[in-house]
Image (cartoon, rainbow, N blue to C red):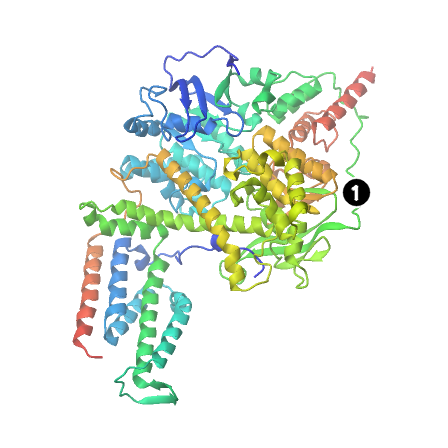
Amino acid sequence: MKNLEFFRRVSIGQYLDADSPVHRLTPATKYLWLFALILPASMARSSLAIILVAAACLAAAKLARVHLRYLLRGFGPVLPLVLLTAVLQFVFGWRDDGSLVLADLGPISVTMREVLSVLGMAARFLAIMMALGLFTATTTEGDSARGIEDLMQPLARLGIPAHGLALAVAVAFRFIPIVAGELEAVVKAQAARGADFGAGRGGIVRKVRAYLPLVVPVTVRALERAEALAEAMDARCYRSKGRTRFVVTVGGRGEALLRLSAIVFGAGVMVLSGMLSW
Amino acid sequence: MSTSLGTPEPAVRHALIDIHSLSYRYPSRSELVLDDVSFSLAPREYVALVGANGSGKSTLARCVCGLLEPPPGSVNVGGLDPSKRADAFEIRKRLSLVFQSPLDQIVASVVEEDVAFGLENLGVPKSDMDTRVEAALRAVDLWSVRKRPTRFLSAGQQQRLALAGAMVMEPKAIIFDEATAMIDPAGRESILDHMDILAEGGTAILHITHDMGEAARADRVLVLSGGRLVYDGRPQALFEREDVSAWALAEPPSMATARALGMKAVAGESARDFGRRLAGLSVLRPSKEAAHGAPPTETAEGNSLAWSATTAGFSYLKGTDQETKALEGVDLALSGGRSLALVGGTGSGKSTLLQLLSALAEPSEGRVLVFGQDTQDPKTDVRKLRMRSPLAVQRPETAIFELYAADEVSFGPRNAGLEGKALVERVRSAMDTVGLPYAQFRDRQCRALSGGQKRRLALASILAMEPDGLVLDEPTSALDPLSRQALMDVIWSRVEAGRALVFSTHSMEEAARADLVAVMRGGRLVALGPPSSVFGPAWREDWGIGLPFAAELSRSARQEGLDLPDGIIDLAGLAAACGALASVGREAP
């Protein structure tokens, strides 16, 4: 790669601007459903849970008019992890594995149980990625911050800084392009003066050695930018109490029902899969 | 330095802001940033605050708003004291700030949500918010993009958004802290127009600026020098003084022009008005025989080309669904020892083109040659090539990464393989050239240098490689007039010494000094030629780049019937042309 460009121009998240019943849901409802899908998909022992979660995701994706391919974009990056786990699985078998041996390569054998286990894990990842993909495709940056505040509102009475956390999330989103831009500036300034970036030579060690000295200046700049933003917020009378909201995220009775059904779905799938042995 | 008041102090019976011998030092620093400053600002006043980088302007603004804590009793904003926390909040309801960097003051990810941020903080009910946000967005002409993500706005739009965020608070005064320094001429003009509208509507304005033309638009100018208030009075009287350069100020172009033509100097006069005034003078009798300027001559390009681009294009994120074309079909060539100025709005492709010309990026289409070498050719040693034609990024001081000045400068030559005595000599000569003498500055911490010094240090770190060409991205942005002048002097001296130069700028005065001017618009090169042609017959209003003062003035005078030649770009040309006209007029019976 000879061109020194970073994420500065990449849009953050995968939000797909559209109008659908799913897009219109309040962020808190979307968060609840996200948890109701991800928790069973990652924790429930039965494969029925994975099937149910995947089915729910597909139905919602249809409603939100989001393509399946778009949802699975997040699966690519975790694929190496899945493959690594598969290899480990085959190398280190279960001690009391009495299932059918499918292939025997001397010290390494592939059994039915191992294959099922790998497939099950891949399916788990797929279901989780679909749920996450659906959430990010239908939720804006601002909403994903506001949703946290809404969900934590009951806890705010106990002194948990719900608004502060939501703001931190919103600012973190804002800072991805800012930090990337700063990194780009330092890398370009150094490359212009003969540093090795993108000149097409050297291995990973060389790369690490080139990038390591950038950590301090980029961090310092990011802190300076953060200070500037904090000052601009202060200048606009920022305070965490006594605020009102410009964007309304209070849902009606339908929303309440949907939130309730998220809890019922999540709990139901967990209980159901606990009762099954497959 | 003693305080000299240009006009008697205005009546301060109902002052909006009253400052009484304010001194301020930053915690853990010994020197005073503000030293015994006193003045007041009346409601509805339009005041400019000028002074060198580091003279205390921004500190003053922050003390007034309580973003910094001034000594108790030194600042009074309508009975409130910003040194008290509770008062500071109330003060910020009445005084809004617009900062320099557009991106650093945007909080929300959607335009309208960002405007509402201040109102949310105040607890304004939703229904009121809607009407106020709409009014503010309509006022700055951003209503149509209210649902857009903020980061997709241009810098000029982002700054208008920041202004809307200030206006929506319905403040009694708005402080602009170099709010026009980082945006292009069209964006700048729009912010300045909004200031005028706000001032007419009764909002007091405190405009911190390095641009003397901007300062001269105000009713009153305050000058800070070394933390002291050294002038408080009308702009006219300020710029009639002989000693303004001692305060790192320069004359606004209208004043300098008037002086050169022997006319009455009027501070704040626009080029257009000046042109009309010039056309109305009876000595300059229009005459058919008046000599026109020589037609712009293109010097033949030499054999050794510094840079050439052939239908060069560049796309970010090529091959993804977010692919954006930043550059398209650019053809240009510049021979060694010549200079090219790139002008055009933000996002027009200037920075991208500069990266292609310094081999930091490869064109996605077409070809770019840097000193005869194809940047896409796998046999080209890109690293070496970059060092022959190094880029100084925008605001290069933010990319300084070494602790000590001399180490920063030696980074390049060390990468080129220099060491020992040769390296020291290289660093010494580069630092001496930019006016940061090696003996005095080598062990200085980079962070402790002033803004102008950092910028010069960054230039030294480029010059230390003794490159054949200089590629500079907005080298003088956000500098005070004297630092700007000092930096450009160093740059032009390198061109005279035979280096090729390509630089981008928002200052048409700077562009007019180059051999060639290239106008960029929407990723395309829409004009390329000598400044007398680009700013003369070829110039088009819709480029949105503005004109050098002398060019705009003569254009306006010509429209009024004065027979000035087309293609005047600087003061010397204007004075010569007027001299010629006057003599023609005199000869006529």
Please state if B581 lies on the left or on the right of B482 as rendered. Answer: right
Is residue B294 in sight in this rendering?
yes
- What is the three-letter code of the residue carrying label 1? Thr
Vertical comparison of B410 with A235: above or below: below
Question: Which residue sits at x=33%, y=58%?
Answer: A20
| Residue A34 screen position, x and y as percent | 28, 61
Question: Which residue sits at x=53%, y=35%?
Answer: B449
Q: Which residue is mark 1?
A: B299
Vertical comparison of B456 with B55: above or below: below
Question: Which residue sits at x=62%, y=35%?
Answer: B439
Query: Quick one: B410 or A16, which is closer to the camera?
Result: B410
Q: Residues within 10 Å of mark 1 (few under 14, many from 20)?
A: few
Vertical comparison of B46 with A181: above or below: above
| Residue B71 screen position, x and y as percent | 35, 22
Q: Please state, as top left, top right, bottom left or bottom right, where the C terminus of chain B lies in the image.
A: top right
- Which of the 4 image quadrants contains residue A75? bottom left
Vertical comparison of A187 with B132: above or below: below
Please state if A148 lies on the left or on the right of B147 as rendered. Answer: left
Q: Chain of mark 1?
A: B
- Residue farthest to the front? B420
Please state if B513 lies on the left or on the right of B473 as rendered. Answer: right
Query: Quick one: B294 or B180, which is closer to the camera?
Result: B180
Q: Secondary structure at mark 1?
A: loop
| Residue B550 screen position, x and y as percent | 67, 28
Query: Quick one: A19 or B501, which is closer to the camera?
Result: B501
Is residue A9 in sight in this rendering?
no
| Residue B406 screen position, x and y as percent | 58, 41
- Which of the 4 image quadrants contains residue A272? bottom left
